[in-house]
Every structure is written in C-alpha cells, then in structure tokens.
Image (spheres, helix red, strand yellow):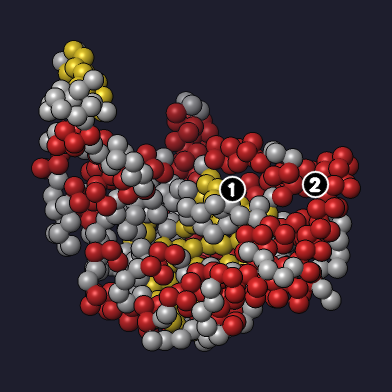
Amino acid sequence: MTSVPILADPAWLEGGPEGSIVLSSRVRLARNLRGHPFTHRANPDERAHVFETTREAIAAAPSLAGAEIVRVDRTSSLDRQYLVERHLVSPDLAAGSGPRGIAIGDGETTSVMINEEDHLRIQSVRAGLDLTEAWKRADRIDDELDAVLDLAYSKEWGYLTACPTNTGTGLRASVLIHLPALMLTKQISKVLRGISQVGLAVRGMFGEGTEVMGNFFQISNQTTLGTSEPDTLGSLDRVARQILDHEKSATEVLLKNARLQVEDKVFRAYGILGECRVIASQEALSLVSALRFGLSAGLIDRVDLGRLNRLMIETLPAHLQKRAGGKLDQVERDYRRAELVRGVFSS
Amino acid sequence: MKCQECGKNDASMHYKEIRDGEVHEQHLCAECAEKKGYVGPAAKGEFSIPNLLGSMAESEFPPGEGEEAAPRCACCGMTYPEFKASGRLGCPECYEAFRLPLIPLFRRIHGSDRHLGKTPGESGEERLRTHAIRMLKERLERCVRMEEFEEAARIRDEIRRMESEDD
C-alpha cells in the first residue's frame, strides 16, 4: 500500500484575476496511445504497460519536472478520496480498477491522470479567470509528451478518444464560478438557461452528476470537433465574463435594496464559523459562501480570500481525517471541522 | 386492462406503432414487454451517457441492414453493437472500422465531423497559420453559399498564397 503524504496548499486556491467571483479555470486534454485498447477494454497487463510507458514520458517532460507519481490503485480508499477532494483525481479514476494513477506537478496546478477513461488526461488549473494560461501550460505538457509518445490522432478527426463526445481537440475547459447574488435575486435560472443555449454545460461544484453546493457553478464547453482550441477557450471566457457582469450588477441591486439583510447574513456566517462547536460540511460550505459574498461585495474585510478557498477543501471529510491521522466517524468529523473553522475565525 | 400477451398481469406498458400506414396498439405487462424486446434502457429508467449515445448511434444505423455490414474492429475485435451498448469505442482503430456510422454521430454530438484544432508536432507559428487557413476556408464556403463570388475569389487567392508558403 502506498501512502499519500499530506500535500502542501494548492497554488490555485490563492485567488487570481476576478478571484472574488471566479475560483478557478481548468483545462483538460484527453489523449491515448496508438495501438492500445482504451482503458475500459484493456486487461491488467495492457493497463500496466500504458501506465509504465506514460510514467516514463512524464518523468522526462520538463514541464512536469519533480512531479509526484502516485499509483492510485495501491492507495487506501481514504487517500483516494483525499485526492478526489483536491480535484486531482476524478471520482471515476478513484473507483476504477487495475493499474492507474496520477502525476502531480508543482503546486498541483498541473497534473496527469493515467488510465482514466482515456490513457492520459492532462490537467491544468489556474486561480481565478485565466483560461489562456491554463491552456498554455496544458498545451506545453501535451507537446512534451507527444514528442515521446505515439498519440492516437487522425488528421480528419483529431485526437481519438474512448468516448466520441471528446473526439477532436479532447479539450474540456471549465470555469468554477461563485454566484450568490444571482441565486439570492433568483435570476440564476435565467442565466443558466442562457448558458445552455450557447452550447455550454453547467454543473455543480464537484463535477459531473453532483448537486450545486455553496452557490458554485462549473461552466464548461461541450463540443470538441469542428472548433479550434482558441475558439473554444474564447467563447467560454466571453460567457464567463458576461456572467461575472450579471453577478456584479445583481450584487449592486442587493446592496441598494437590502443592504441590512445582506450584511446580517454575512456577519451571522462570520459569527457561526467563529463560535460553532459542531458543523456539517454542507453548512460550513454555505457559510463560507456567504463570507465570500461579503468579501466580493465589500461588506467585510477581516477575512482573506485565499484562506476561505483553502477552507472549502480542508473541511471536506477525507481532509479532516488525513489531518487527524486516521478514520473519523461523522460525529467526530463535525466536531473537528468546527474546531478547524473556529481556529480561523475566532481570533 | 390486462396484458394482451399473457392475459394475467395488468398492462402497464402501452405501445403505438405505425406499420405500413396502419396504427397498431399493444398493451403489455412489464414482463411481456421485456420478453418481446420493447423495454430498452430508457424504459427501464437507466438514463446515462453511454445509453444515450448508444441510442443516438442506433438511429444512425438502422438495425438489420447496416449492422451486419458493419465490420468488427480488426485491432481490438469490438463490434458495432458492443459500441452501441457501452457508448465507448474499443481502441483508436475502431474509428476506421466504424467510420460510416460515426460521421453522422459526430454531426449530431458536435455539429461537425471535421477536426479544426491542434495538430501534433506543429510549432506555434505553423499552428496559427493552419488556424488562419481553416478560418479562410470556412469564410470561402460561406461566400459561395451566399453567392458572393468576388469576395470568394479574393479569399481563394489568399488561401493559395498562404498555402504556397508551406513549400
């Protein structure tokens, strides 16, 4: 069994361009090795071969120098959940079978999943709204791996992936955006409808198939064939900026019409986080969301954005257990979570 | 209403079919409907991307004719029905084996069946030029459709000039 060490704070939680509303920008590229069955049809030996070939290529890639390569199938279920909570590993990779893993680059801003649905999933994440930089880094890693690996590509259809929804660029770009004012003013469904009309997808914070939590929404492109990478990134960036403007005007409306109520919500959140004795993760997330809103609306300045962002990850179940050094039941987790947030807010 | 097939259970599935211009109705219980092959993934309430893709692929390939003609992937042995069932291809070679049904599937999913993105091994500059040429070709197609022939001729020359820089 391989044990995953407690990792340092991810650099992408430190707040970037438009950081008070946009948490992060992500790019992932799906790639496969020519002449090998896709992961779901590969036997354990073939998966091990793909893992080894990819591992060597990653070790030789300058952009991934010093990357930690973890065999996810050799880790405990707690460690797997820990990696999922940090957005390094997808729930599918965690739950999969056979040789598979993750290469974690510097500051967790770049990483490569091995033997997920596709042989390689190159991932790059930046703080705030910064798709261009996220793309540049993923693109560079792709070039470096391509120099060593024989990637499955056709001139006509681009990168060949296990699922035809990713064929072409293999690019999924996404922006994680915090929209409390649009939620409070009940304009969110109108905005979300607009997003789906322009061919983008909206999901909850933790990716595919999960509920929207803490007013976080993930907006991503859906098509990968017939559009170039710059066009895909450009239209996502434009839409994200439009939503950002909507959120800002909704904030202004709220401050003009209901300042007292909004202030009350923000400071109650501050009070609870500073004094609670037990707290569930859902409640912690929604209180942190209220404080984030207080920050972006200029109502409160005694909290730090980066600290709030980190807290969203640190208060998740596997993170609390790693910190405590062993398994905790739910009651213990709620107690430890309260202790953690109190330490941050009561001073 | 009792099931038309077994006459015992209550009919909970109702089908309307139009064959040769005539409407045929069937009222079946869940068990008989499944036996007769009426209950697909959607009817069982299993709604997933592979199922959805599978059913999209289904409509591209009328069962009975295309399917037998569809080859097996020579590399990994996957058959088209297997692809339909899982929604995932078996290996990169499957793209060639299932080329014919994949084209309309791509058009449905992506609204296109042509890659316009990155080419491996291209330098940044080459990539920009490839992109520019693709954009011009798209504009050329639009101009021809709109019968703006003068502009089309200008764009054609521009494409020729850019492509000759390749040599």
Which quarter of the figure is the C terminus of chain B placed in?
Answer: bottom left
**In the image, residue A155 above or below residue A4:** above
Mark 1 or mark 2: whose residue is earlier in sequence = 1
Instruction: Please name the residue shown 34% across and 54% down the image.
Output: A163
Q: Position of residue A43 (x, y in %)?
A: 22, 71
Question: Visible in this render: residue A11?
Answer: no
Q: Is residue A204 left or right of residue B78?
A: right
Residue placed under numbered mark 1 in the picture = A235
Furthest-top residue in this view = B22
Q: Amino acid at mark 1?
A: Ser
Number of numbered discs visible in the structure rendering: 2
**In the structure shown, which secondary structural element does the residue marked by tag 1 occupy?**
helix
Camera-side residue: A187 or A228?
Answer: A187
Q: Is residue A307 left or right of residue B162?
A: right
Camera-side residue: A277 or B164?
Answer: A277
**In the image, residue A235 above or below residue A298:** above
Instruction: Please name the residue shown 43% across and 56% down the image.
Output: A169
Residue placed under numbered mark 2 in the picture = A251
Which quarter of the figure is the N terminus of chain B placed in?
Answer: top left
